Amino acid sequence: MYNEAHNVDFENFKVVYFGYKYGKNIQDLSYSNITLNNTRTGLSFQMAENITVDNITIKNGDPIFGDGLDYCYMNNSTLSNIRVVNVSNHKNPATGSYGLTLIGNNNIVHDYYIDGVAWSGTNLKGSNLTVYNFTVVNSGHNGFESQVRNSYFKNITVTDSDAHNFFQVSHDIELARNNIYENIYSVRPGTGYGIVAGDNASDTVIKNSTFLGRGVYIMDSTNITVMNCTQGWSEKSSGLYFARVSANNENHTIIDSSFTNNAVTNSSSDKNVVYDITVNGVNNTKLINVNYNRSFSNIVDNFTRYYYTDILVVDKSGIPINGTTIDLTNEINPSIQSVDGWGRYKTTFSTTNGRTYLPDNMRENSPSIAEFNRLNKSTSNSYTYEANIIIPNTRAQSLSGITPDSSWYRKDPNIPTYTITAIIPNTSSTGPQIIGFAPAEDNPFNPGEKKNFRVWTDEPLTSMEWLVNGSSVLKGPLNYTWTVTDRNTTIEFIGSNADGPVNHKWDLGESSNETSGNDSIDDEIPEQEVIFSPADSVITLKVSEKTVFSVSPDIFTTKEWYINGYPIQNNTTSMTRCWSTAGTRDVTFKGAGSGEPVSHTWTVNVVEEEKNDEESTESIIAITPEYQIVKPKQSFGLDITVDPSTPITGTQIDFAFNSSMASANSVIEGDLFKQKGASTFFNEGDINSSEGIIKHIYGLIIGTSNVSSPGTFATVNLTAGNRTGMAEFSLSNVLISDINSKSVPYTVTNATVLIDTAPAIDPVCCPKSVDEKSNLAFKISAKDADGDRLTLSASGLPEGSSFNRTSGAFAWTPAVGQAGVYTITFKVSDGYLTDSENVTVTVNKLNNPPVINFFEPINSSSFSEGERIGISVNATDAEKQALNYSIKIDGVMYSSDLAYVWETDYSSSGNHTIEVSVSDGIDEAKMQHSIYISECHPRYDVNEDGVVNILDITNVSREYETTVSKPYPRYDTNQDGEINILDLTLVGHHFGEKVE
């Protein structure tokens, strides 16, 4: 159909199309108030441009093939108020069944609800997608699957998916990148995680989100940021998991997040412990103000734990000093620098009113320093820092040995937990002075917490003592660690040297800023009324019905939401929720600010919608592979497990497999019917490998016993064949007997196993370095033991380079300005498995030769014999390197300076070549000029008659003791402007000579 549609019901259709992928497109149309019931594969909009779809309900589809919005090819379009319910059976997962498949660019999706789909809730591809107010429950695979870029997702709730709740991966060669996930809510993912960023995903932000059960899984990705997220109550795996499988996994930043309350199944064995954070292959990753209790690090990891640093600079009277700059230096390893609130390396921070910025005020000027850097499971380096306080027109002040620890963690990033106060001392003092102390009296002190009290002094002390409530507890050091017991405690430091005493006291009574300090003023401040919505504290909702819980006005600095006591969301005064199952929930808001704390609870009764038929309870019989991947000719086993819904006494099955992919060897009995020690009978069935079937596998209990707990009914042992690919295994003719020899309803879960050997990239032979403007070329090749067709790809290609995915040829001529180190990742795939190789190339900066700006004398200049000729050169070098000079005349070296004066005489006439050269030690620049020196009659033959005699002398003596100006006459024989004995001496020296 190619027209608009409104207020239409479709019943018992196979599929409904508007537009068609292989037909004409639909454009500038709208569709609304459409219902599909008992439609096999759903509703599809194809070849769609700028369409609007609103208020759509799709329900009760095919249990295996049913979809919601199915393979919608759309651009610049909007989908809203969509409800997809029970379109396929999530308890029997089947690939290809989605609640929404959307392919295209610049689309908007909002207010979309999915409950019950056999595969993933979504299948999203394209770019510039905006999704908000989206809920997915009960998907047979992943809940919210996205393969997009440059997209934004907000207010997304996913619960009870069979695999992952959120799943971001790369699609083909288009990498998932530049995406933001905000206010996402993940509850109880099945075998997977709350959210997965994997398969070369990059530049993704996950913020303001909550994960109940497994949390965040980051695999083979770069630049993933997790910010202000809360995770807890995972019973099977870590709350935060980093994994490197086949590609780089690096440059991640976790900020202001918490991963706690994850179950420990056996504290005596690390193998059975659920860690809050597992690091299993990651590089250059930062954890900033992250709360966790247990972590595990593998052999090749590199991550650093940072805490916010709060420094206040005051004068001797305690007044904050404006214009202060703070420079932070790692005293143990300067390469582990401090970072700002975004996790970017930075060492110098400005302040506001003498204090470092809080993250909310200016994150780029909010410093964090490293507690430790972990390189592997057994190697962890701890650090101390020096703070250099710089004040204009004042000498710098330094505090050394600053050591962050877990007590610096801030539940609210904008409430400092450990403040260092730097004091600029009096310069006129003659005794020792305290130039810093920590913590501050207004920092929080929680019972059981350990706080490191310490002071800094401008002179070494000979006596040091710490007192608690007046009693001495420690002597010798400048710091004391106190385990907080009672806020009403006094901590005091007393020290001295030969020049005098110092002391500092912490009076840890109730915080002085709890009231104004003036009872009359406090009484005049009216308490602001807080309004809760819904107004009723007890409300009733239907399954899948949305409700907005809100609190106003927003007068709180901390805002937290809980459901049945579990933290769900924070930093907001409203929360939208719906539930997929009936039951009673307590929704609680807790807020704190300048006034009294506020707490309010709604009791929510969720009831089922009326149904015509009651759902039956089914047993589950499933195939569970020993390995998900096996090599050709490798032996492997498949367990057939049964999870009874009622006590059972026997089971029979037929087992089918692809005979071209594998052969069956044997079937052995499992432990299902032996759980209570009963006698059993088991028939391994009739194996027919040529047809790929094992018939008549059955087992039973002999006697009156029964079982109701899950167990393994049988194990099928197979051997993989020579072919590669996905081998499918299925069950048929299933019959399960209860204690009354009646058949039990069941659900079958079949399985697949990949038979394949990973390809391998051949060793790459390429130059380790290349100069700018020089050619670099090499070839990537790979082998596959199975002879599969291979596909090459590359990531991190430098600008201007090329890579032929067919031939594997790489070529690049780095341009000027591309100097640096480049790491290129080459990847080979056989369609299933991959191998990758990193190639690092250093591009050397091309040296710029010196430039001669000018050179004197200018070319073709003329001079006379006897003149002084000034030679000079001016040159510059782009890299400002030291320059060496050379001045040659007619090929003879005369000077290594940049200037030289040539004293010519009466033998100097003729053509001459002057050459200057300038070198920076690498390259050289040269320039030549030609000049002409004309022949000149000697001045001592004053009358120019060819003979030097008395007539020349009298010519000079006649003008004796006179002065002349330019042009000088010939009787001024030395051309100095004065006629004197020097002129007569010059003529007399040549007396009697003939001039030819």
Image: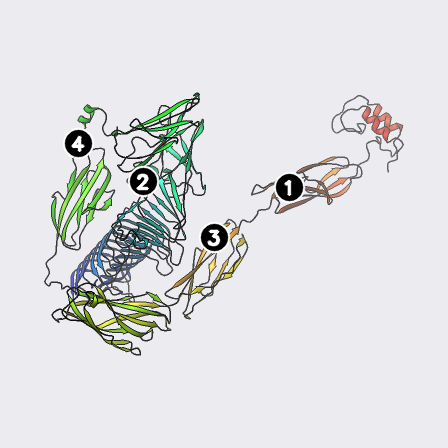
Position of residue 846 in the picture relative to residue 136 (left or right):
right
> Residue flagged by tag 1: what amino acid is it?
Asn
Mark earlier in primary sequence (1, 2): 2
| Tag 2 secondary structure | loop
> Residue flagged by tag 3: what amino acid is it?
Tyr
| Tag 1 secondary structure | strand
Residue position for label 1 = 884
- Vertical order, 696 against 613 (above or below): below
Which quarter of the rendering shows the C terminus?
top right
Residue position for label 2 = 409
Residue position for label 3 = 822
Place of residue 805 in the rendered image (x, y in percent of width and height, measured from the top left): 44, 63
Cα–Cα span, label 1 and label 2: 58 Å
Cα–Cα span, label 3 and label 4: 61 Å
The answer to whether residue 798 shows anywhere in this view is no
Mark earlier in primary sequence (1, 3): 3
